[in-house]
Amino acid sequence: MFAWMHAWKNIYRQRKRYRQFVPLLLVCALLSGCFLSIAAPCRQFSEQNHREIGMELTETDRQRELQDANARQLGQAASMLQTGVLLVGAVAVLYVSSLMIGERFSDIGILYSVGLTRRQIFFSFFAELCTVCVLVIGAGLTAGSRAAVWWLAYRIRVGVLPTGLENYIGGNGWVPGCIAAAAGILAFPLLRLMLRLLRQDPADLLRDRT
């Protein structure tokens, strides 16, 4: 309870250290929400609406086949871009978050001096990072998903994509993947923090600050 009660205060006090972490995380979440919301419906539509191409096609059939091909190619491209965003973004976010936590080890000595235990300090950092990640990732995914839905609806309206694609837009298939990605982003820096707290002598942390 102590950790969650003081999470907002800690975030405000450490706002300068979040100036690199928050924008980076927001951009990754925004792009992830956008590409996932494009890739998922296009790939589902392509898998469930595959047509065999005949020798003779009417003009309407050719137009539908072209629209289906556009949806299939768009789904593949969005999936590839999504993979790149996850790989590059995860490495960058993990690196920045680890540096941010590493810079605050000297402050942990003060928390020891006022009577906090290792467990309380760890959960204080956990609550702080979890609050930031949930808010930023949620905002980025929502904004990216809405932008992707609007763009897909526009492409359908102008005839570039098939009208049947509308039935697959707006699903929440990206939620489990994004939760797993957020957990992975939090896991590495928090594991590093836990190991450092277990190995470090509280007196050394306080001496480093002075």
Image (cartoon, helix red, strand yellow):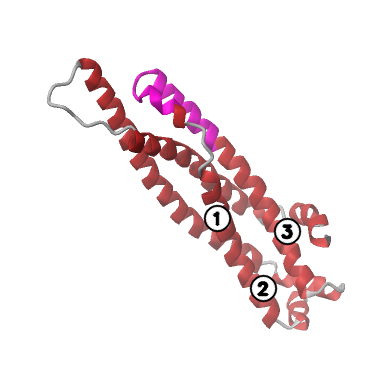
Q: Amino acid at mark 3?
A: Ala
Q: Is residue 201 left or right of residue 59?
A: right
- Residue 194's tag is 2
Q: Is residue 143 above or below residue 27?
A: above
Foreground disc of the pair 3, 1:
1
Q: Are marks 2 and 3 in contact (CB under 8 Å)?
A: no
Image spot of residue 192 (x, y percent)? 61, 72
Read off the residue under disc 3.
Answer: 127
Q: Quadrant of the C terminus?
A: bottom right
Q: Is residue 67 left or right of residue 123?
A: left
Q: Is residue 160 above or below residue 130?
A: above
Inspect the magenta stretch and tell me whether residue 146 lies in it: yes
Segment colored magenta: 144-166
Residue lying at the far top of the rendered structure: 59
Q: Nearer the viewer, residue 41 or 134?
A: 41
Q: How many marks?
A: 3
Read off the residue under disc 1.
Answer: 180
Residue at figure coordinates x 83%, y 72% from the top left: 116
Secondary structure found at label 2: helix
Residue at figure coordinates x 61%, y 60% from the top left: 186
Residue at figure coordinates x 70%, y 62% from the top left: 126
User: CA separation, marks 3 and 1?
Assistant: 17 Å
User: CA separation, marks 2 and 3?
Assistant: 14 Å
Secondary structure found at label 1: helix
Q: Is residue 152 left or right of residue 46?
A: right
Secondary structure found at label 3: helix
Q: Is residue 120 above or below residue 76?
A: below
